Image: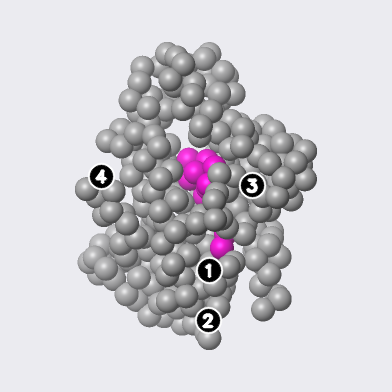
Amino acid sequence: MKVKLLCIGLYLMAAAGVFGAEVTAVTGTGDLQSNVQYGLAGGERLLLDLNTPVGAGNFPVLILVHGGGWGTGDKEGDLVPAIGSVITGNFSWFSINYRLAPKYQWPACFEDVQTAIRWVKAHAAEYKGDPSRIALVGYSAGGELVCLAGVQADADTRVQAVVGFAPPTDMPADTQRRGNLLSKSLQALFGHSPTVDAGTMKSMVEMSAIDYVYPGLPPFLLIHGTADQSVPYNQSINFKAKLDANKVPCQLITIQGATHKIADWDKFDPTYKDQLMAWLKQALGVNKQ
């Protein structure tokens, strides 16, 4: 565990700029590289950080997508500090940045996630990853993006598993609870006033994974706190019900009393990471190599 913590510590130092751009840090649990370009869009370099584990290779792959209301956040934030210590050394993982609102509006961020999936599929083997065993993992707005990518995948972007941490999957329902007014995040994402019109309703449906569920999708894991006021817990309950109705495997890990902030979830249920790891190993066939 000390080695893993050292590994993540070096990663966070690199992310903070201590070592500069395009950093490689080699530790007992792998090769950490920062600011690797996976695409170019809107004149901006799309960057990711990655970890290559120690070992012979053919590791299952995780693509991490951060939260932040589609307008803030970064590849070094939320997910990596929360789960980095348990995934490092067990998976080849890639944590991505994507274009943010209000500079870039919907669907730019979603298009970047799809670009990242294609890039990882094409390059996973270079980092000891198995491109036939990929899971998308996203938190909050990143959870929305990975759930949507999971249900709207084609041959180029299809993955084997999806994990949503507190993901909003039904944007019209979320807007309805706000008095039929767009949240500040959606106002920035759509470049629109709070008032809902036909155009914004169309966009909200387009970004709602619950509206695109069909049989044959990969398995989903949802992790959500019951006291979440930003993305209500019933978003995951309803999404799971839709997946269940279509016979798509789905597990919901409920964290009693937890709010939206993932950094605090250990205080409510420190076992959720063990449950996450067990699910990922089963979904990606870790014990079947």
Q: Identify the disc placed on residue 189.
A: none
**Residue at position x 49%, y 21% in the image:** 201
User: In the figure, is residue 275 to the left or right of 6?
Assistant: right
Q: CA–CA distance between discs 1 and 4?
A: 27 Å
User: Whole-Å distance between the Cαs marked 1 and 3?
Assistant: 25 Å
- Horizontal side of residue 269 vs 177, given as left or right: right
Q: Which amino acid lies under the numbered mark 3 shown in the image of this protein?
A: Ile
Q: Can the viewer see residue 269?
A: no
Circle number at residue 223: 3
Mark 2–mark 1 distance (CA, rounded to whole Å):
12 Å
Instruction: Say if residue 70 shows up in the picture.
Output: yes
The residue singled out by tag 1 in the image is 131
Cα separation between marks 2 and 4: 35 Å
Q: Are marks 3 and 2 in contact (CB under 8 Å)?
A: no
User: Mark 4 sits on what residue?
Assistant: 42
Q: Earlier in the sequence, mark 1 or mark 3?
A: 1
Instruction: Say which amino acid is labelled 2.
Output: Gly
Mark 1 or 4, nearer chain start: 4
The residue that label 2 is drawn on is: 57
Q: Is residue 5 above or below residue 268?
A: below
Which circle's residue, 2 or 1, is located before the other in the chain? 2
Q: Nearer the viewer, mark 2 or mark 1?
A: 1
Write the start and end of the magenta stretch as one range. Answer: 134-149
